[in-house]
Amino acid sequence: MHASKNDEDEISRNTPHKTTGQSPAELHERKTLPTLFDRIKPDLNTKSDIDIWKQKMYQDRKSKSRECRIGKEVWVKNELNKGWSPGIIDHPTRELSYEVLLAGKRKRNHADELRKENGALDE
């Protein structure tokens, strides 16, 4: 199978030169010209970006915010008694990590170890 004259021209215009590292089309037009492959292959970047966005929206539809405000009453997971104890958010230490006042003591907890519920200190 022989390449047509147009295909040969396209190949020579888009083949990078050994010295410059750029194709004649890039040097002349200051942009890369579309090749045969560009015309027949799907634009994976756009399609994958859309698919990633759809997947994120699907996964996030039931997610809850894990950020807490200073002074907010929370339930703190207790590893020793396998239960929950009431506490108050003192200040954030890192992203999703907080220092909590718990029975007069300060303890650092991740947001996964906290439950934001009203009435935590009413008991």
Image (cartoon, helix red, strand yellow):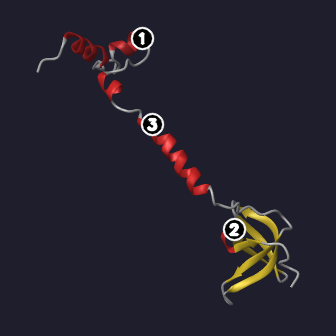
Q: In this image, 89 relative to 42: left or right?
A: right
- Circles 2 and 1 in contact, beta carbons < 8 Å: no
For the residue carrying disc 1, how many other residues have a C-alpha within 10 Å: few (<14), some (14-19), or many (20+)? Answer: few
Which residue is denoted by mark 1 in the rendering? 29
Residue drawn at 74 percent across, 78 percent down: 76
Q: Looking at numbered disc 3 in the image, what kind of residue is underneath it?
A: Asn
Question: Where residue 75 sits: x, y (%)?
Answer: 76, 77
Is residue 67 shown above or below 108?
above
Q: Amino acid at mark 1?
A: Glu
Disc 3: CA contacts within 10 A as few (<14), some (14-19) or many (>=20)? few
Q: CA distance from mark 2 to mark 1?
A: 54 Å
In front of the other: 57 or 120: 57
Foreground: 47 or 76? 47
Q: Which residue is mark 2?
A: 111
Q: Nearer the viewer, mark 3 or mark 2?
A: 3
**How busy is the neighbourhood of tag 2: few (under 14 within 10 Å), some, or many (20 plus)?**
some
Residue pointed to by mark 3: 45
Q: Nearer the viewer, residue 93 or 121?
A: 121
Quarter placement of the N terminus: top left
Label 1 SS:
helix
The label shown at residue 73 is: none
Quarter of the rendering occupied by the C terminus? bottom right
Vertical comparison of 63 with 103: above or below: above
* Left or right side of 92 for 21: left
What secondary structure is marked by label 2?
Answer: helix
What amino acid type is highlighted by mark number 2?
Ala
